[in-house]
Amino acid sequence: MPELRQVHDMRSANGVEVASATESGTAESGTADSAGVAELRSEFCVDVRTETLREALNHIGTRAGWTLRRTVGPDTCLVIDEPKALIGHSIARSTILVVDPTPWGAHAGMKALASGTVSAVVSSERPTDLCEALRTVRAGWASVPLDVLEAASKMPDLTERQVAIVGAVISGQPTREIAKGLYLSDASIKRELATLFRSFGADNRLALAALGTSLGFRPRRVCP
């Protein structure tokens, strides 16, 4: 995940400015009105695996007047960057998933949204979009920025087996090891590879690995 910079800039690309709380307890805002400011003053919980992202979200939350929590209650908005973090947090009313700015990350976010696992998806390249996402989910709507939709549209439509094979190819596993790990024959893996070459527009395994990496796939060995 790329390092997040310039998180002090509270104005997002779509013109939304976060309300910042003052010491007197009032709020200063740009485009947000008083009702929007009150709506933003809510508790949220950050459960992310990337330290730079955590710092960015903490900074934005402080500026916006949100109260950061490490435990989740019924009215808490959970901000995560790993779907596994949802385990044990089923009581959260709404969840925002921060994804890698790649077709793979965006596609995973869209799947989570479609399944109802999360209420909104935000790209890690645009942490200030979290402000708009919080407003949207608190109003009862789902939220996906255009850049995430565009990235997800670049992702080939693959089966779970094909996804596993791409990860194995990127990790450098030979065909025989992949076949053994997936309990398939060498011939079956070769047929899947031929299909993947066509889907990705690749001529060989090296090209498939390079294209898969550019889309956000991660090296992942398959084991029996």
Image (spheres, grey):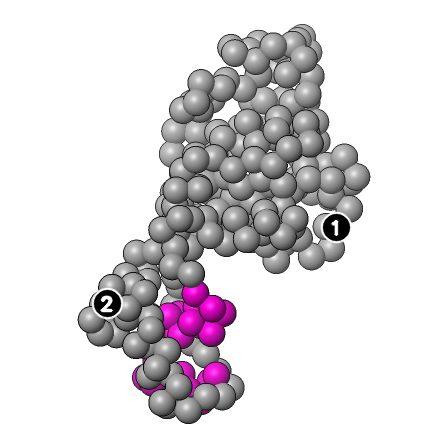
Which residues are the magenta region?
Answer: 158-182
User: Tag 2: residue type?
Assistant: Ala
Q: Which is the main secondary structure of the residues drawn in magenta?
A: helix
Disc assigned to residue 197:
none
Disc 2, SS? loop
User: Tag 1: residue type?
Assistant: Ser
Image point (75%, 50%), residue name: 90
Residue 122 location (% of width, % of height): 50, 39
Q: CA distance from mark 1 to mark 2?
A: 41 Å
Q: Is residue 179 magenta?
A: yes
Is residue 40 visible from the viewing direction of this image?
yes
Q: How many marks?
A: 2
Disc 1, SS? loop
Image point (74%, 40%), residue name: 93
Residue 166 location (% of width, % of height): 37, 70
Disc assigned to residue 202:
2
- The label nearer to you, 1 versus 2, is 2
Tag 2 or tag 1, which sits nearer the N-term? Answer: 1
Compared to residue 191, the image places residue 81 above or below, namely above
Residue placed farthest to the left in the image?
A: 203
Image point (65%, 48%), residue name: 116
> Label 1, on which residue?
90
Is residue 46 visible from the viewing direction of this image?
no
Residue 117 location (% of width, % of height): 65, 50
Q: Is residue 52 magenta?
A: no
Compared to residue 61, the image places residue 30 above or below, namely above
Compared to residue 3, the image places residue 65 above or below, namely above
197 relative to 185 in the view: left or right: left
92 relative to 180 in the view: left or right: right
